[in-house]
């Protein structure tokens, strides 16, 4: 997989160019022309040659070769093809072999008077071996894989490789392209190569498939094996050696591509372009966010200003209405005062329709109440009536209004008296209800109040149901229990119940005390009423019970430390009360289901 992936960049790379645009186009066309010529020349150099252009080169050391070491010889040089080598066709190899046979065959040399050695020791055997290796495709490929003149060296990553990247690496990739299983191997290119070409090049070489194999270097010759077992063992040894060499070859090719990628100036340029593009996109996003933020703030400012303007207008409208209402009220007040004064003046002029001083004072008092009770419209109507009437009619009208006012006052008094009588009656009934409480009922009430503390849903109905379940007297309501509990303080209830419980205990065990008599081991106990648990203490106790389970060491000491203001004994007693409360609730639920 290639390290370098196309990110959708524009293929064209910008380069600074000084001069007119026409010169730039000419330079571009010249670069394209040179590039095509270089590619054609490289293809020609890497490819084969025509048969008519084939030139055989005589191997100078041919006659000095030892047939026993034929495997170490250069087979291409023996046949006269030292330069063409792997590019030679099979026909060209056959042609070279025939030429060598015609020239170096022992019979031919004997006829020419040359003294020849035995057939097994003659150098002609090396020519025969060379053709045996190169004459078939399989054996030839095995030999080509370990071509003795092939340069396996790869350039390292250094300053020279970076500055002269194309001269250094182009020939190396062209040399190693001969091992490719695929045709049309992409070349390295030049500094003007597009990003697609560079990407295709590195994708190909990072996934390079080589046909190179190393069977020619097998150390074990399976043909010399004595049996099948030895032959299989030799094949296993040869396969292991080939796999090791193949692995080393793959590492070498990988290292070559890694070094080229690290030194390639085009990759650096593309990465810089990508980085710049990302920075530009990031800056554009930041700018867009800034503008959006400014627009949002501007919109908020406008909305706030509009809202403040509306609030100001609404406030001004309210103030205006209040001022108008105040003026209207002042005006109405003045009119009311005027009408009241008019009524009083009229009555005063008529000597209040009374002869004695005491009657006149009484009427003045009643007129004041009437003026307060009547509204403006009623006063205006009354003044109009009495001003257009005679003295007797005016007196009758005023008397009628006073009588109506008296009836109204009497009706209000009667209603107040009825309400007060109803309250006193309910208080009397409540006091009668609370009187019918026995000692056992008080004990049950105290226990129920402790079992069902404040915050319990329908607390007093639950208390009443508990009392009706455990008491001999049935039919108590939650209101009765609440009234009885309100008549006495909670501490008084507990104190009273504890006192009666102590008296009952004394009565029950008085005979035993008299017979046994006092002893030194007797311990006096106080039955003091414990202080009430608040809701905050209750929450802390519940949380501490959850935090410290029964398996905790010194559990109750830790619980008492968590509940501020409470001792270990108080916490344990409260826990027992809670357990009894839960049991009582379950019993009530079961009884409710049965009923």
Image (tube, rainbow, N blue to C red):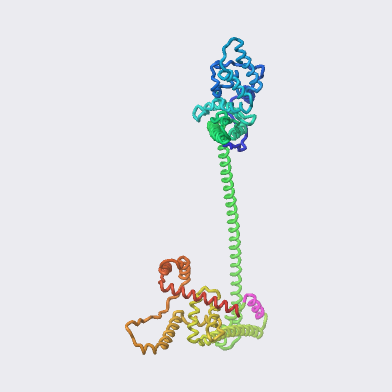
Snapshot quadrant of residue 345: bottom right
Q: Residue at x 67, y 82 (%)?
A: 389
| In-front residue for pair 134/580 | 134
Residue 537 pos. (x, y %) = 45, 70
**Dominant secondary structure (helix, strand or loop) of the stretch shown in magenta:** helix
Q: Residue at x 41, y 71 (%)?
A: 566
Looking at the image, is 503 positioned above or below residue 159? Answer: below
Residue 291 appears in the picture as rendered: yes
Which residue extends farthest front? Answer: 226
Give the tally of numbered discs: 0
Residue 506 pos. (x, y %) = 40, 87
In the displayed structure, does residue 512 sit left or right of residue 543? left
Residue 8: within the magenta? Answer: no
| In-front residue for pair 187/129 | 129
Quadrant of the image containing the C terminus:
bottom right
Residue 377: within the magenta? Answer: yes
Q: Residue at x 56, y 25 (%)?
A: 147
Which residue extends farthest left? Answer: 520
Magenta segment boundaries in residue numbering: 375-387
Residue 34 appears in the picture as rendered: no
Looking at the image, is 418 positioned above or below residue 314? Answer: below
Looking at the image, is 522 positioned above or below residue 173? Answer: below
Residue 549 pos. (x, y %) = 46, 67
């Amino acid at each position: 997989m290639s390290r370098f992936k196309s990110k959708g960049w524009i293929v064209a790379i910008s380069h600074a160019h000084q001069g007119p645009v026409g010169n730039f186009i000419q330079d571009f066309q010249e670069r394209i022309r040179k590039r095509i010529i270089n590619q054609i020349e490289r293809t020609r150099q890497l490819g084969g040659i025509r048969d008519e252009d084939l030139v055989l080169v005589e191997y100078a050391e041919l006659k000095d070769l030892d047939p026993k070491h034929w495997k170490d010889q250069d087979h291409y040089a023996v046949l006269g093809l030292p330069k063409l080598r792997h590019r030679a066709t099979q026909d060209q190899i056959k042609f070279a072999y025939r030429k060598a046979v015609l020239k170096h065959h022992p019979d031919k040399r004997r006829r020419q008077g040359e003294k020849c050695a035995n057939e097994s020791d003659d150098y002609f055997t090396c020519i025969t071996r060379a053709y045996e290796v190169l004459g078939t495709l399989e054996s030839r490929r095995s030999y080509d894989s370990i071509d003795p003149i092939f340069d396996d060296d790869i350039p390292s990553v250094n300053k020279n490789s970076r500055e002269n990247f194309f001269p250094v690496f182009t020939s190396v990739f062209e040399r190693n392209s001969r091992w490719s299983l695929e045709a049309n191997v992409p070349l390295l290119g030049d500094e003007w190569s597009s990003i697609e070409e560079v990407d295709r090049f590195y994708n190909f070489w990072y996934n390079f498939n080589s046909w190179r194999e190393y069977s020619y270097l097998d150390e074990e010759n399976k043909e010399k094996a004595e049996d099948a077992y030895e032959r299989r063992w030799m094949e296993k040894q040869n396969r292991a050696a080939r796999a090791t060499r193949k692995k080393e070859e793959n590492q070498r090719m990988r290292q070559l591509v890694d070094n080229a990628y690290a030194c390639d100036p085009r990759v650096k340029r593309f990465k810089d372009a990508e980085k710049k593009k990302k920075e530009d996109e990031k800056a554009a996003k930041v700018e867009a966010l800034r503008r959006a933020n400014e627009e949002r703030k501007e919109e908020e400012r406008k909305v706030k200003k509009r809202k403040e303007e509306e609030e100001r207008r609404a406030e001004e409208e309210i103030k205006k209405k209040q001022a108008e209402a105040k003026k209207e009220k002042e005006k109405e007040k003045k009119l009311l005062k005027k009408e009241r004064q008019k009524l009083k003046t009229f009555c005063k002029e008529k000597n209040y329709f009374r002869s004695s001083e005491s009657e006149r004072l009484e009427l003045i008092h009643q007129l004041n109440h009437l003026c307060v009770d009547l509204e403006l419209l009623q006063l205006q109507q009354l003044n109009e009536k009495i001003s257009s009437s005679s003295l007797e009619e005016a007196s009758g009208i005023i008397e009628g209004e006073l009588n109506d006012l008296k009836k109204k006052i009497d009706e209000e008094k009667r209603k107040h008296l009825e309400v007060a009588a109803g309250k006193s009656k309910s208080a009397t009934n409540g006091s009668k209800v609370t009187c019918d409480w026995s000692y056992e009922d008080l004990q049950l009430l105290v226990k129920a109040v402790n079992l069902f503390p404040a915050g319990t849903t329908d607390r007093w109905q639950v208390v009443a149901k508990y009392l009706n379940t455990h008491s001999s007297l049935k039919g108590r309501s939650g209101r009765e229990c609440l009234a009885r509990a309100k008549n006495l303080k909670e501490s008084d209830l507990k104190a009273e119940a504890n006192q009666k419980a102590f008296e009952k205990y004394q009565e029950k065990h008085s005979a035993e005390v008299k017979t046994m008599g006092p002893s030194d081991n007797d311990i006096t106990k106080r039955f003091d009423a414990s202080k009430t648990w608040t809701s905050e203490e209750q929450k802390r106790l519940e949380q501490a019970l959850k935090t410290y389970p029964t398996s905790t060491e010194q559990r109750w000491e830790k619980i008492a430390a968590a509940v501020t203001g409470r001792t270990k004994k108080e916490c344990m007693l409260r826990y027992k009360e809670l357990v009894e409360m839960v049991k009582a609730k379950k019993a009530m639920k079961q009884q409710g289901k049965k009923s």
